[in-house]
Image: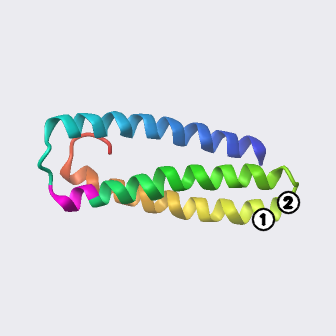
Amino acid sequence: LKRLVVLIMITVALRAALCGWGLSVQWNGDHHAAIGLWSFVALRWLSGIVGTLVLAAMTWQTLKIPNTQSATGILYVGVICSFLGELTSQLLSVQTPFPL
């Protein structure tokens, strides 16, 4: 389970780097994007990236105790946050050519 949490942290960090690049390209290209677009970007980053990373860190701390049942419950919440972020990313991909 610890290896899985490390893998989650690495993949979320890589996803954040890719989306950060897409966000910088989008920001440099169009400053006057709709406010709805930026609210979806905020939801995507707060839920899909930051939320998932925070919950993975909480799972890591829980596994130090060791308490695998609680860690699994936290991972379930992390999966829901990840799904919410990825679904928001799908909505954003219709409007922008870069991953946000």
Task: Locate residue 99: give its quadrant.
Answer: top left
Query: Where is residue 94 drawn, in percent x and y?
Result: 22, 53
Q: Looking at the rendering, which quadrant does residue 78 occupy?
A: bottom right
Q: Are marks 1 and 2 in contact (CB under 8 Å)?
A: yes
Q: Amino acid at mark 2?
A: Asn
Q: Amino acid at mark 1?
A: Ser
Q: Is residue 91 above or below residue 93?
A: below
> What's the residue at 27%, 54% (across, down)?
92
Stretch of the chain drawn in magenta: 34-38
Residue 70 picture location, percent across and down: 78, 65
The residue that disc 2 covers is 67
Q: Is 43 located above or below residue 60 in the figure?
A: below
Q: Which residue is mark 1?
A: 70
> How far apart in space, not on screen, are marks 1 and 2 (Cα)?
6 Å
In the rendered image, which quarter contains the C terminus? top left
The residue carrying pointer 2 sits among few (fewer than 14), some (14 to 19) or many (20 or more) residues within 10 Å by Cα, namely few
Q: Which secondary structure lies at badge 1?
A: helix
Vertical position of residue 20 compared to residue 63: above or below? above
**Left or right of residue 43, residue 29 in this image:** left
Residue at screen point 45% across, 40% down: 16
The secondary structure that most of the magenta stretch takes on is helix
Q: Is residue 54 magenta?
A: no
| Of 12 and 93, the residue lying toward us | 12
- The percent position of residue 60, horizontal first and vertical second, equals 74, 49
Q: Is residue 97 left or right of residue 9?
A: left
Residue drawn 82% across the image and 59% down it = 68
Front in this rendered view, residue 59 or 72: 59
